[in-house]
Amino acid sequence: MTKKRGSLGRGLSAILGNTSIETTDEEKQKNIPSEGKTHYILLTQIETNPFQPRTEFNQEKLHELALSIEQLGIIQPITVRKLKENKYQLISGERRFRASKIAGLDKIPSFVRIANDQEMLEMALVENIQRENLNPIEIALSYQRLIEEVKLTQEQCSERVGKNRTTVTNFLRLLKLPSEIQKGLSDGKISTGHARALITVKNIVSQINIFHDTVANGYSVRDVEQLVKDFVDSDYRRISKNKVPNAPQPLPFQYQKMAHDLSRNLEKEIEIKRNKKGKGKLIIPFNNDEDLAKIFDIINK
């Protein structure tokens, strides 16, 4: 029988297999939910998915979904696998499952599948990757789990999720960033474009410093790409401090870049102090008269 390719990608369709499994006479007589069919199953009979790729569930969004369920019901059934009689495990749809509990439902429409642990993991990962509300790090971790735990190559992974292999590779590269920057990307403090630019910086301290300055000063992706180009092989010193109430506006990017260039040429950690009106000081430290003379020589060249 020829399998049709669905919207969730060829791999998931292959795992799901034929969706027209027949119910046996015994199951019909006992009214037992059978594989390949949609049934209303008690929430108390369903346990959550230990392979769930999503680690955080926004409580406000869950309550919004619960209100929608109270008014309109469950529009799309969850997917479960049968463990034993009257015992099921979630494959996908944990948000709907949790929101249904909040809404006070007793039963939920569920599509029953047959799946071993590896198939269940792959189905859960692929189904989650297809959702638009995952952040870039969640997507990257899902790709990584598909490759490592389901034993897929990057090429096979790209086929499973219906994405170009380059797309998968670019997401996986995000996991090379320090955890602090990964969290900033997950929280929306920087974009994927910012993160991809930062990957090429070899020095981890410089990566983190550019990240903090980007967040503090609102650098564009192009600004970060320029900084990365200038400091890809050299140290970048952070110039932004933790924001305080009524703090002066930061210097425009072009002046901050000039300050970094000067700091690099002088081999000194210069400091810029500026008030709300824009008036300020440029402070260049020196150790002795000889050091000061050297600074003047460099500036006058």
Image (cartoon, rainbow, N blue to C red):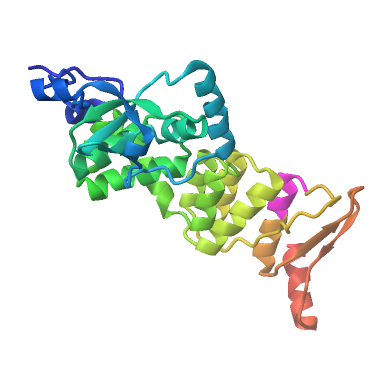
| Residue 289 spot, x, y in % from top left | 80, 82
Quarter of the image with the N terminus is: top left
Quarter of the image with the C terminus is: bottom right
Q: Is residue 32 left or right of residue 92?
A: left
What residue is drawn where x is 30% and y is 36%? Answer: 91
Image height of 111 relative to 135, above or below? above
Residue 262 seen anywhere in this rendered image of the structure: yes
| Residue 15 spot, x, y in % from top left | 19, 31
Q: Nearer the viewer, residue 212 or 55?
A: 55
| Residue 61 spot, x, y in % from top left | 56, 33
Residue 133 seen anywhere in this rendered image of the structure: no
Q: Residue furthest left?
A: 1
What residue is drawn where x is 59% and y is 45%? Answer: 224
Q: Nearer the viewer, residue 73 or 196?
A: 73
Q: Is residue 178 left or right of residue 297?
A: left
Q: Quadrant of residue 40?
A: top left
| Residue 69 spot, x, y in % from top left | 50, 23
Q: Residue furthest front?
A: 29
Q: Main secondary structure of the magenta part?
A: helix
Image height of 201 relative to 56, above or below? below
Residue 254 lies in the magenta stretch: yes
| Circle count | 0
Image height of 216 relative to 236, above or below? above
Q: Is residue 250 left or right of residue 152?
A: right
Q: Quadrant of residue 298?
A: bottom right
Residue 297 lies in the magenta stretch: no
What residue is drawn where x is 53% and y is 51%? Answer: 183
| Residue segment shown in magenta | 251-258
Q: Nearer the viewer, residue 300 or 162?
A: 162
